[in-house]
Amino acid sequence: MIRKCFSIQGLLFIILLLAGPSAIAQQDRSVHWIGFEQLEDSLDAKPKKVFIDFYTDWCDYCRKMDKVVFTKPEVIDLLNEQYYAVRLNAETESVIAFEGQKFVNDQVGKSRSPIHQIAQLLALRNGRFAPPTLVVLDEDFNVKARYFEYMDSKRLIKALQP
C-alpha cells in the first residue's frame, strides 16, 4: 500500500516537474510595456510602429483591458512583434524626458483629474481626456489612429493590423 501511494505521488511529482516550467512560461508571457524614455532610445535604434495605452488608476475599463485584452496571446504577440508598446498613467506627476524636452503634469493642484502634458498632446478628444485612450503611431511617430474607448481583443487586433 505504501509503495503504491509512493508511486502515485512520485508520478504526480514528475508530471508537475515536467509541466511546471511550461506553465510558468505561459504565465510570464505578457506585453513588453516600455516608458517614453525607453521609447526614444528604441526608435533611434530600430524604427517601429508605436502603440500607446493612456490609462488612469480609477478607470474600470482600463483595468478590464489589462485583465481581459492585454493578456490574450494574439494581442501580446502582435504588440510585441510589430509595435513598441507604451503605457502611461495620464495623471502621473512624473517628469518625462522625450526628444530633448521635459514634459510635466502642470495641472496638479489645479484640476481634480490632472492630465499629463504628453496625454494632452496625444490623447485628447474635443479638448477632453477620457480613458482608456489608445493611440497608434507609425514608424515616424505620426498619429495614425486614436481610440477613445474600451476595445475587446478582436477589435484591437483589427485596429492594429495593417
Image (tube, grey):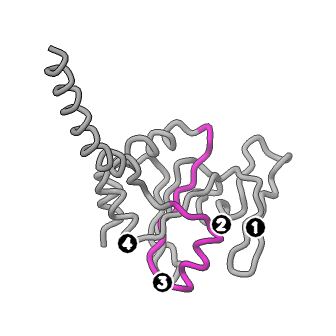
Quadrant in which the N terminus appears = top left
In the rendered image, which residue does mark 4 sit on? Answer: 82
Q: Do the residues labelled 2 and 3 touch (CB within 8 Å)?
A: no
What is the C-alpha distance between the residues marked 3 and 1? Answer: 22 Å
> Residue 53 lies in magenta, yes or no?
yes
CA gap between label 2 and label 1 equals 10 Å
Q: Are marks 4 and 2 in contact (CB under 8 Å)?
A: no
The numbered mark, 4 or 2, whose residue comes first in the sequence reads 4
Q: Which amino acid does label 4 sit on?
A: Gln
- Residue found 45% across the figure and 79% down from its top: 48
Give the camera-side residue of 125 and 99: 99
**Magenta residues (range):** 33-58
Say if the magenta span includes residue 91. Answer: no
Give the amino acid at mark 3. Pro
Q: Is residue 124 left or right of residue 146?
A: right
Residue holding disc 2: 121
The circle on residue 103 is 1
Give the CA distance from mark 2 to mark 3. 21 Å
